[in-house]
Image: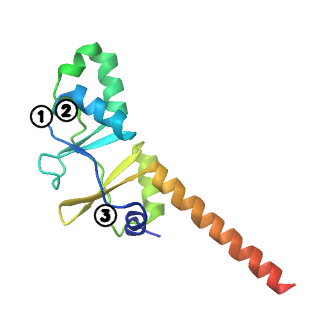
């Protein structure tokens, strides 16, 4: 199974925010959409950064509530770890664990084409395990 399969199942919609947007607006967007990260993009296709709940919490600890008046570009992570549509789920799990991240923008030929979260990866893996267990049960039942 690969990233492309996850995107086919969940869709390719990515919630983005402009780098010059106010952090307060980004926080409201995160809450309204019920998500944990926003891809930062000036044009919706090029990846400028990512703003996660972790970025906001760290800034809150460092700057207090004044962070809400800052721009997204002031808080975003600029060195974003990405993946490609052909990457395997095992590769994603390894990268998410190694980098201690929960969201991977999917980039194909320099363009943003999706976003995969740890929830997507776990859901996919559980479905694979259930399918394997069902196949084994059917094999065992058929062999008797």
> What distance separates the C-alpha of mark 3 from that of mark 1?
27 Å
Q: Closer to the observer: label 3 or label 1? A: 1
Pointer 3 with pointer 1, Cβ within 8 A: no
In the displayed structure, 107 sits above or below 14; it is: below
Q: What element carries label 1?
A: loop
Q: Which residue is drawn at 16% across and 28% down?
A: 71
**Which one is closest to the eye, mark 3 or mark 2?**
2
Residue hosting label 1: 20
Q: Name the residue under label 3.
A: 84
**Residue at 39% across / 68% down in the picture?**
8
Q: Earlier in the sequence, mark 3 or mark 2?
A: 2
Q: Where is residue 84 in the image (x, y as percent from the top left)?
A: 31, 64
- In the rendered image, the quadrant that contains the C terminus is bottom right
CA neighbours of label 1 inside 10 A, class few (<14), some (14 to 19), many (20+): some
Where residue 62 sits in the image (x, y, percent)? 29, 17
- Asked which secondary structure carries label 3, the reply is loop
33 displayed left or right of 131 = left
Residue 140: x, y in percent? Answer: 80, 79
From what the image shows, is residue 72 above or below residue 104? Answer: above
Front residue of this view, candidates 80 and 143: 143
Q: Is residue 58 above or below residue 42?
A: above
Are the residues at dot 1 and dot 2 in contact (C-beta closer than 8 Å)? yes
Residue assigned mark 2: 72
Q: Which of 1 and 134 is in front in this view?
A: 134
Disc 2 is placed on an element classified as helix
């Amino acid at each position: 199974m690969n990233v492309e399969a996850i995107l086919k199942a969940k869709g390719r919609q990515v919630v983005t925010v402009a780098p010059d947007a106010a952090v307060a607006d980004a926080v409201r967007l995160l809450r309204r959409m019920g998500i944990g990260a926003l891809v930062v993009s000036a044009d919706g296709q090029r990846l400028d950064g990512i703003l996660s709940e972790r970025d906001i919490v760290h800034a809150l600890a460092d700057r207090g509530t004044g962070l809400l008046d800052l721009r997204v570009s002031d808080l975003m992570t600029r060195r974003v770890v990405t993946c490609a549509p052909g990457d395997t789920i095992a590769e994603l799990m390894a990268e998410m664990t190694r980098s201690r991240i929960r969201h991977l923008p999917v980039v194909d030929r320099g363009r943003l084409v999706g976003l995969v979260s740890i929830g997507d990866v776990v859901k996919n893996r559980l479905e694979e395990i259930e399918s394997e267990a069902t196949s084994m049960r059917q094999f065992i039942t058929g062999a008797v």
